[in-house]
Amino acid sequence: MSAPQGWWREAVVYEVYVRSFADSDGDGVGDLPGITSRLPYLRDLGVDALWITPFYPSPQHDHGYDVADYCAVDPRFGSLEDLDTLLDTAHGLGLRVIVDLVPNHTSSEHPWFVEALAAPPGSPARSRYLFRTGRGAGAEEPPNNWESVFGGPAWTRVEGTDQWYLHLFDSTQPDLDWRNPEVAQMFEGVLQFWLDRGVDGFRVDVAHGLFKEESLRDQDRPEEPDAGDAPREIVERTLADEPMWDQPEVHEVYRSWRRLVDDYSDEHGTDRMVVAEAWTQTPESMARFVRPDELHQSFNFSWLLADWSAPAFAEVVRGTLAAMAPVDASPTWVLSNHDVVRHPTRYGGGARGLARARAATLVMLALPGSCYLYQGEELGLEEVDVAPEHRQDPSWFRTGEVGRDGCRVPMPWSGQEPPYGFGPPGSTPWIPQPADWGGLTVEAQRADPGSTWSFYQRALAARHRHARGAGPVELIAAPAEWGADVLAFRRGSLGVVLNCGEVPVPLPTGRLLVASGDSDPGVLAPDHAVWLELPQGSSGPSSISL
Ligand code: NOJ
């Protein structure tokens, strides 16, 4: 049976990167009491829920995505009692709480992996992970050619033996073997544990990765894709060979989780959910994770990956809605998270990047389904160029390339100098904050009606009034006067227009509900978006008039 209410279907969910949100004890790292102290802030901003990144005991080689104990709180982030307080406070403020679940791999310090390393090849302890014999006469080559997402081979050799273990991420994150039933059993227990604690949902890390093609065959990976004379669009549609991702067996796991979570919801009269982080190759494969008997939602990264172009955005909207319709799942939208370059920077940085970021956000908030925001985007924060000596992302250590630290710099709350209220005065944040963030703090922006923070608050309030429950999306073909680079759609009487072009376009008739920034009267400036209330009686896509 499906859950009673479906609060998540149209929710705005705010991602809290636990290390970087609020540090209550001055050790330079954010923590659960810090989050609790800032919950009224999230209520005032106008979000419906928060998703908290992993706070479980972990050596922190991948900042918590390397879990050593799935049913406890790492002392550096607080205690189970702190989590209880956080949940009670959030619920008292009308906020839901989603926690992160990391089932693809454990930490190399998880007792299972420690036991596996101490056990002989072929032992039950090793069969919870993917140990294989290396290739070559002396087993000196990895068992296959897979590469870690963080760079370098996806295999590490067990010292002094011919055995290697698989890690699709860092070598401290060994992949579990989901063909071993013990693994599934363990995670059902983990879900149950946190449900009993009162969480409202789970975000499933690497949800598309749990099963690998059983043979663990080589990936077919041409060094340089040979485009030949093929037209560009055909080349782009060619799907990569990915024996390590998106295998059919994974769906049975999600069917069983759906039953578990929905049964729990029914039994307790509550409404819990699961959202997948599944980097699939097509909207159709994303839709398979949210069939009616599978997960409730899946992150949709297609907008985040799209270029700044109205036709590209229109295709994202069309493709997403078309893929979700047959499975009757609520779509999701996301522009930033802790793994990608912040969207003002992606859109070119500076004033233009920020204008575009605000415009894209406003359009996203008008779409049906849920929106996932990332902490600091409401301040218009840009990616920070973190000095090499302060970089901590495992991919930096594995490849020497700038990793994801630049989007993880601790939040500036108040004041004119670091730590900007992130921690007590005099404390040193785990990644240094820029010296010029004084004007970007929450305190400074809340006092300024023209700030990005004030814009987010207005836009979120407008979403509650005008977009939630509005009609289906009807994309509108841009009239010739608008040029090619305008995205426009309506949902009932709500009209949304985004100008991705280089020249102002005339604004359609309608009452202005919310704008991403200032434009001259009667026009929509480049890099701006608006919501309009379309005149009564207008219906159908063609009825937007200039
Ligand atoms: C996705 C998480 O968002 C990312 O931060 C992490 O490094 C990988 N999964 C591995 O767990």
Image (spheres, rainbow, N blue to C red):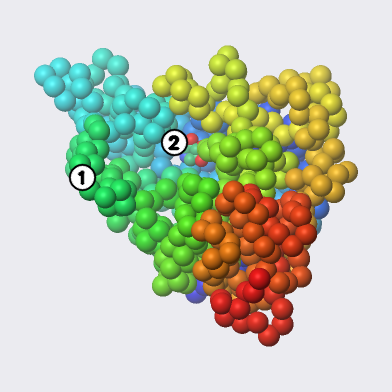
Q: Residue 257, how many percent across, how many down? A: 45, 59
The residue tagged with tag 2: helix, strand or loop? loop
Crowding at label 2, few (<14), some or many (≥20) Cα neighbours within 10 Å?
A: many
Q: Is residue 533 above or below residue 76?
A: below
Q: Is 493 situated left or right of 280 in this image? A: right
The circle drawn on residue 350 is: none
Residue marked by disc 2: 106
Q: Quadrant of residue 4?
A: bottom right
Residue at position x 50%, y 74% from top? 1
Q: Quadrant of residue 288?
A: bottom left
Going from N to C along the chain, the mark reached first, 1 or 2, is 2
Whether residue 156 is visible, yes or no, is yes
Q: Is residue 371 above or below residue 468?
A: above
For the C terminus, give its image quadrant. bottom right
Q: Residue 119, how many percent across, how many down? A: 30, 27
- In the foreground, 315 or 328: 315
Q: Is residue 500 above or below residue 71?
A: below
The residue tagged with tag 1: helix, strand or loop? loop
Whether residue 11 is visible, yes or no, is no
Q: CA distance from mark 1 to mark 2?
A: 45 Å
Residue kind at label 1, given as amino acid type: Asp
Residue marked by disc 1: 229
Residue at position x 41%, y 72% from top? 326
Q: Quadrant of residue 471?
A: bottom right
- In the foreground, 307 or 425: 307
Crowding at label 1, few (<14), some or many (≥20) Cα neighbours within 10 Å?
A: few
Q: Is 53 situated left or right of 259 in this image? A: right
